[in-house]
Image: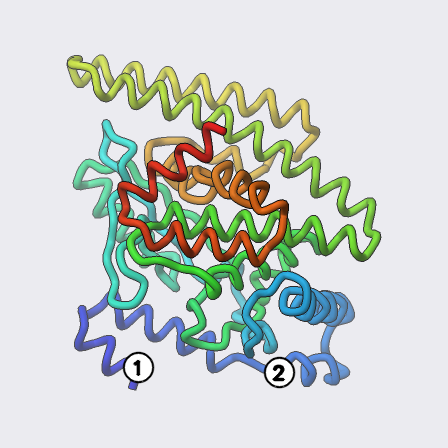
């Protein structure tokens, strides 16, 4: 039925999306059954027990949705569940947007097969866009289906696994159409505070220290990226010859790459870190969607004295503003 409905909406793209979602749903198994299976690898069983603990914590302490999401496990036998395509014009940091019936307009397009994402990316490059394709290990259906834990999520360490669980459940708590930046930054704020509290309550000092260092590093990275975005926006707004703009763009991105290389070396992170992929406008957009408004939500939580129900209520109130008023309000929070 899902395939038939998808086929009537918009042909091939929705058909592949429906097929991919059906595959995920078809491969689900209750976590309790996976744990009872003697053939389940010990490391998988250990991670799934952690998920069960974090799932209970998300309901009892963080006030996240109490439903059947993340009560099952699905092994997709691949590294990523979907591949997201981001695009932006050559001289702009305004992302290309795609609109869908349920989630509204978002700044990326997801494919369940890597080669399909590659074909879409090439079409966009041929049309003159900067393009970035990134593998995604987890996503939320916003409560429309009972999302499973995926084998693709097992690539992360324990803290990242718990964090993504909180992040995706936050999308089920609050999601507004046509504002990817709001949705992702809100979910990242919930993830951040949820992980801090989960680790502190379980007296996992070593894990908490590593998480704090990674969070500090992420903040330093975003400082460098935001400075680059500011400079590029200045260049793009000027009345310059296109070739001159290209040179300025290339130089500034090379400068960012060198800054990130030094930051990685100083942090002791591995040289194959996710930051080493080439940068362009589309890749800069992908960073800003997840962390661009995070300082505003951190301030919102601080204004609530770190009380989550107050924070959720205030985020809902802001979400009901029109887009311009919402953006202005979040900007004011960021400047504080």
Answer yes or no: do the residues labelled 2 and 1 have beta carbons within 8 Å?
no
Please tell me whether residue 129 is drawn above or below residue 42 in the rendered image.
above
Q: Which element carries disc 2, helix, strand or loop? A: strand
Please tell me whether residue 123 is drawn above or below residue 104 in the rendered image.
above
The residue labelled by disc 1 is 2
Residue 37 percent across, percent down from the top left:
73, 84
Q: Nearer the viewer, residue 291 or 319?
A: 319
Label drawn at residue 30: 2
**Circle 1 Cα neighbour tier, 10 Å, few/some/many (<14 / 14–19 / ≥20):** few
Q: How is the image coloured?
A: rainbow
**Circle 2 Cα neighbour tier, 10 Å, few/some/many (<14 / 14–19 / ≥20):** some
Query: Quarter holding the N terminus?
Result: bottom left
Residue 191 percent across, percent down from the top left:
58, 52
Q: Which element carries disc 1, helix, strand or loop? A: helix
* Identity of the residue drawn at 15% across and 14% down: 239
Residue 328 percent across, percent down from the top left:
33, 36
* Identity of the residue drawn at 63% across and 61% down: 62
Please give the count of numbered marks on the rendered protein: 2
**Is 51 displayed left or right of 281 in the figure?**
right
Q: Which quadrant would residue 55 be assigned to in this image?
A: bottom right
* Identity of the residue drawn at 38% across and 17% down: 252
């Amino acid at each position: 039925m899902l395939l038939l409905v998808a086929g009537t909406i918009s042909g091939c793209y929705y058909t592949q999306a429906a097929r991919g979602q059906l595959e995920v749903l078809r491969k689900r198994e209750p976590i309790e059954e996976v744990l009872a299976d003697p053939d389940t690898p010990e490391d998988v069983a250990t991670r799934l027990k952690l998920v069960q603990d974090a799932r209970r914590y998300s309901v009892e302490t963080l006030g996240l949705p109490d439903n059947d999401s993340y009560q099952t496990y699905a092994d997709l036998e691949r590294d990523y569940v979907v591949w997201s395509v981001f695009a932006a014009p050559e001289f702009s940091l305004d992302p290309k947007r795609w609109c869908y019936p349920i989630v509204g307009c978002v700044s990326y397009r997801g494919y369940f097969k890597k080669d399909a994402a590659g074909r879409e990316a090439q079409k966009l490059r041929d049309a003159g866009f900067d393009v970035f394709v990134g593998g995604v290990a987890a996503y939320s259906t916003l409560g429309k289906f009972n999302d499973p834990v995926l084998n693709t999520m097992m690539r992360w360490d324990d803290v990242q696994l718990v964090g993504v669980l909180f992040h995706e459940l936050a999308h089920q708590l609050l999601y507004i159409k046509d504002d990817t930046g709001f949705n992702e930054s809100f979910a990242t704020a919930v993830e951040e505070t949820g992980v801090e509290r989960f680790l502190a309550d379980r007296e996992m000092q070593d894990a908490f220290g590593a998480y704090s260092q990674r969070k500090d590093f992420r903040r330093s990275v975003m400082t460098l990226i935001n400075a680059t975005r500011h400079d590029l926006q200045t260049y793009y707004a000027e009345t310059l010859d296109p070739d001159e703009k290209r040179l300025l763009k290339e130089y500034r991105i090379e400068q960012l790459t060198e800054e990130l290389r030094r930051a990685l070396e100083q942090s002791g992170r591995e040289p194959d870190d996710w930051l080493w992929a080439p940068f362009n406008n589309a890749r800069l957009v992908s960073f800003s969607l997840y962390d661009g408004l995070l300082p505003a939500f951190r301030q919102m939580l601080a204004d609530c004295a770190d009380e989550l129900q107050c924070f959720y209520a205030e985020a809902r109130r802001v979400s009901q503003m029109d887009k311009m008023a919402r953006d202005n309000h979040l900007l004011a929070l960021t400047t504080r």
